[in-house]
Amino acid sequence: MGTITNEDLIKRIEGQFPGQATILGEPYGLLTMETTREHIIDVLSWLKNDAVLQFIFLTDLTAIHYPDHEKGMAIVYHLHSLVNNVRLRLKVFLTIDDVHIPTATTVWDAANWMEREAYDFFGVLFDGHPDLRRILNVDDMEAFPLRKEHPLEDPNRVDKKDYFFGR
């Protein structure tokens, strides 16, 4: 079982995709890189099919809503190369008004349910997905519950007033 360092991984990715993938950091040793929606499928396909890297396992695919950022939505892919015992996190940032991204089901069949979940909770539209519909919430639900678009508490609640707590 071989291993590849993060530095080797960065060199290979930047060599294959110059200027199309940028490093965001290495929190806890997990290399995190960013790319664009136009290049994500090419990058994912190459990472999976490269004879040396072999990122054959899509561990997770999800979204994150950043309401205070210019690009308010991030699509996050966690990949694992079982052969090289290395993991990689890829992010694609999108504006909240345009959350379209190509489907990764063309690369991994396992992306199907993960993309449906990201659609169900965040409203991310995966273009080309074979069956993009809600998976955990009710079908007629209009909101996306994991977007941070609503206050955490009802401001009209009377049991949260300071005078109930001696303040």
Image (cartoon, rainbow, N blue to C red):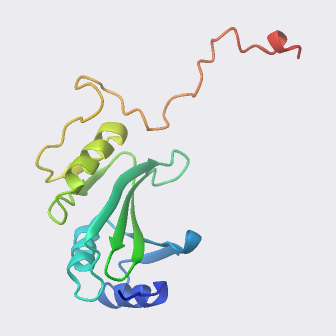
Quadrant where the C terminus sits is: top right
Left or right of 51? Residue 157 is right
Quarter of the view holding residue 120: top left
Residue shown at the point (30%, 29%) measured from the top left? 137
Residue 114 percent location from the top left of the image:
28, 50
Q: Toward the viewer: 24 or 99?
A: 24
Which residue sits furthest left? Answer: 130
Quarter of the view holding residue 153: top right
Where 35 sits versus 95, above or below? below
Answer whether residue 18 is visible to the viewer in this image: no
Left or right of 20? Residue 129 is left
Quarter of the view holding residue 71: bottom left
Where 114 sits versus 53, above or below? above
Where 86 sits versus 129, above or below? below
Residue shown at the point (39%, 46%) measured from the top left? 96
Residue 111 percent location from the top left of the image:
23, 56
Quadrant where the N terminus sits is: bottom left
Answer whether residue 19 is visible to the viewer in this image: yes
Residue shown at the point (81%, 10%) measured from the top left? 164
Which residue sits furthest right? Answer: 166
Where 58 sits versus 151, above or below? below
Residue 94 percent location from the top left of the image:
38, 55
Q: Toward the viewer: 24 or 52?
A: 52
Residue 80 percent location from the top left of the image:
35, 71
Residue shown at the point (41%, 72%) measured from the top left? 88
Left or right of 105? Residue 54 is right
